Structures are given as C-alpha cells and as structure tokens.
Image (cartoon, helix red, strand yellow):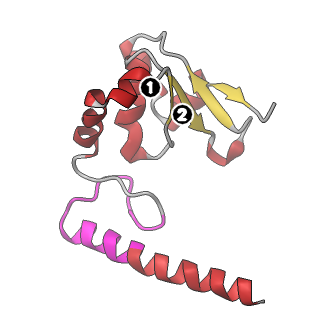
Amino acid sequence: MRHLEEEVEDKAWKWRIRKRVCDLMEREKIAQNPRPVHHRIPNFVGAASAAQNLRGLEVFKGVKCVKVNPDSPQKQVRFLTISGGKQLLTPQPRLRTGFFSMLESNMFTPTINEACTSVGVAKFGRPIGFD
C-alpha cells in the first residue's frame, strides 16, 4: 500500500510542474498546436529551429538509425532523420500493429513530409514487433 501512495504522490508533484509549464507556455504565447498543450508533450514556437541543431552534432551525423517519438514537437527531428539518409524508428501510437515502425530514407521529399506525421508513419512505416 505504501508503494501505491508514493506513486500517487510522485505523479501529483509532476503534474503540478507540468501544469505550471503548460500554463506559462499558453500565457507567453509560445504554445503551438495541437491544443490544449496540457496532458501531452507540448508543441512550442521554435521546435523546428531547435531540431536543426541536430545537424551539427557528431553523434547524429554518425548514426544510421534514430528513434524519435511521434509527438508533434519532434516532427522536424523525424524529417531530418529520414532526409538525412537515416532510418527512423518511432513508437506506434497505441501499439496498433507492432511496437515500433521503421521508416527508410529512400523517399522523395514530399513523401518524407507526409511520412513524418502519425498518418504517414501508419502509411509508409514497416511495423516491428518484439521478435
């Protein structure tokens, strides 16, 4: 029972911090769609610009496969991964047909733009299970 109480308490303080950050983002007008930003990883003004910093990182330059979450603030990271000739590994929303989806880098740019969305991952991604 003690463990459950600690878990609830742990989530409560995290929620208070997350709420303050999301409220601040809305108040300062740096929150971007999808809205509301509460109860999700919030998108923000400058997310795409921040992603551009990856190009200069040696660790990003040297890898062949990058795991990126499907959240909207990371869309540009997914684009940079695929357009940079790397494989993209992304968790499947609600584990529809596998655990992850793999997207290859052999796409034309308009297709890459679509592939970086949740609909595009379902359309172009190859499901990967636990096997």
The span picked out in magenta is 18-39
In the rendered image, which residue does mark 1 sit on? 114
Which residue is at the far right? Answer: 131
Q: Quadrant of the C terminus?
A: top right
Which residue is at the far left? Answer: 28
Q: Are marks 2 and 1 in contact (CB under 8 Å)?
A: yes
Give 111 or 7, whichever is nearer the viewer. Answer: 7
Q: Quadrant of the N terminus?
A: bottom right
Quadrant hosting residue 17: bottom left
Residue 21 colored in magenta in the image: yes
- Judge from the rendering whether residue 109 lies leftward or rightward of residue 122; answer left or right: left
- Classify mark 2: residues with Cα within 10 Å, few (<14), some (14-19) or many (20+): few
Q: Secondary structure at mark 1?
A: helix
Q: Position of residue 40 (x, y in %)?
A: 47, 60
Instruction: Say what amino acid the circle numbered 2 marks.
Output: Val
Query: Residue at left 71%, top 40%?
Result: 96
Give the numbered dot on residue 119. Answer: 2
Q: What's the distance in space between the residues labelled 2 and 1, CA to CA? A: 8 Å
Instruction: Say what amino acid the circle numbered 1 marks.
Output: Glu
- Classify mark 1: residues with Cα within 10 Å, few (<14), some (14-19) or many (20+): some
Figure check: 37 above or below 99:
below
Quadrant hosting residue 56: top left
Q: Secondary structure at mark 2?
A: helix
Q: Position of residue 130 (x, y in %)?
A: 78, 35
> What is the tally of numbered marks visible in this picture?
2
Query: Residue at left 68%, top 88%?
Result: 5
